[in-house]
Image (cartoon, grey):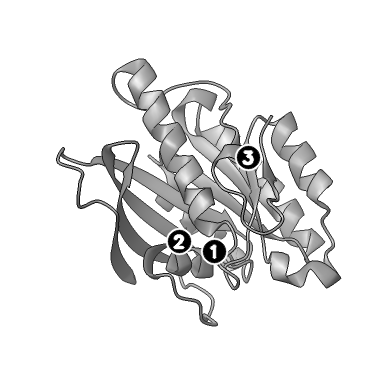
């Protein structure tokens, strides 16, 4: 299992960090590892498919609180599908990633969502649908409206990103972190809140600002 550690703007956070488990789910080659690497180290490179699972940690500061995100990057190949269930158990948040230029990956993301629904109660996990590879706009197969409609109908956060162009990658993870903190604050303990209502339009407007949650 590969492991990478990072630290983002946590120098001023004096309290013990809140620790959250975050899983990346989606088909092979949708860019899950690239998103994690861009967020952790602000780097992009072509990455071979993940075998089993890769593990990353990132410490960051959000609204005066320190957070430690334990990021589990799961393999997208079908042969690892059953193993991935072992990794997302106990998760506080999940990124459902698809490639906007690959319709099948969008359909696979919907299957992953159904499996999360079977594993978690709505208040137990924060889920964001991520349409990655906006740099492939010319070959897009999944419209912004399709992604937004699925997210809204299932009360998920939603954002489009490009790990290659560093487009809204930090915003995606920050949205997750902010929602996790909000749930913890509202409940005075473990993250619990139904139907996330975070408006990603206020988290940043890089390039075309293709993100939303109403």
Q: Residue at x 46, y 73 (%)?
A: 51
Q: Seen in the image, is 91 located left or right of residue 49?
A: left
The furthest residue to the top? 187
With respect to residue 56, does 2 lie above or below?
A: below
Which numbered disc flags the more N-terminal residue, 3 or 1? Answer: 1
Q: Where does label 2 land, which residue?
A: 73
Q: Seen in the image, is 151 located left or right of residue 21?
A: right
Q: Position of residue 195 (x, y in %)?
A: 58, 23
Give the CA separation, mark 3 to mark 1: 22 Å
Please tell me whether mark 3 or mark 2 is closer to you in this view: 3
With respect to residue 168, does 146 lie above or below?
A: above
Residue 85 appears in view:
no
Q: Residues within 10 Å of mark 2 (few under 14, many from 20)?
A: many
Give the CA separation, mark 2 to mark 1: 7 Å
Give the CA separation, mark 3 to mark 2: 26 Å
User: How many dots with numbers?
Assistant: 3
Circles 2, 1 touching at the beta carbon (< 8 Å): yes
């Amino acid at each position: 299992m590969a492991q990478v550690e990072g630290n983002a703007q946590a120098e001023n956070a004096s309290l013990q960090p809140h620790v959250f488990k975050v899983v990346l789910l989606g088909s092979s080659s949708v860019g899950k590892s690239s998103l994690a690497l861009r967020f952790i180290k602000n780097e992009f490179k072509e990455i071979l498919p993940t075998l089993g699972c890769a593990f990353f940690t990132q410490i960051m500061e959000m609204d005066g609180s320190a957070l430690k995100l334990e990021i589990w990057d799961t393999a997208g190949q079908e042969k690892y599908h059953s193993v991935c269930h072992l990794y997302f158990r106990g998760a506080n948040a999940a990124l459902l990633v698809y490639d906007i230029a690959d319709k099948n990956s969008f359909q696979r993301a919907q299957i992953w969502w159904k499996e999360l629904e079977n594993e978690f109660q709505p208040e137990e996990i924060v889920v964001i649908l991520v349409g990655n590879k906006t740099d492939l706009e010319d070959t897009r197969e999944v419209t912004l409206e399709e992604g937004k409609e699925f997210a809204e109908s299932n009360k998920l956060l939603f954002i489009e990103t490009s790990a290659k162009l560093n487009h809204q990658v930090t915003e995606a993870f920050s949205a997750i972190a902010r929602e996790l903190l909000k749930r913890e604050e509202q409940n005075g303990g473990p993250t619990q809140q139904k139907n996330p209502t975070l408006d990603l339009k206020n988290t940043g407007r890089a390039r075309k600002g293709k993100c939303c949650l109403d």
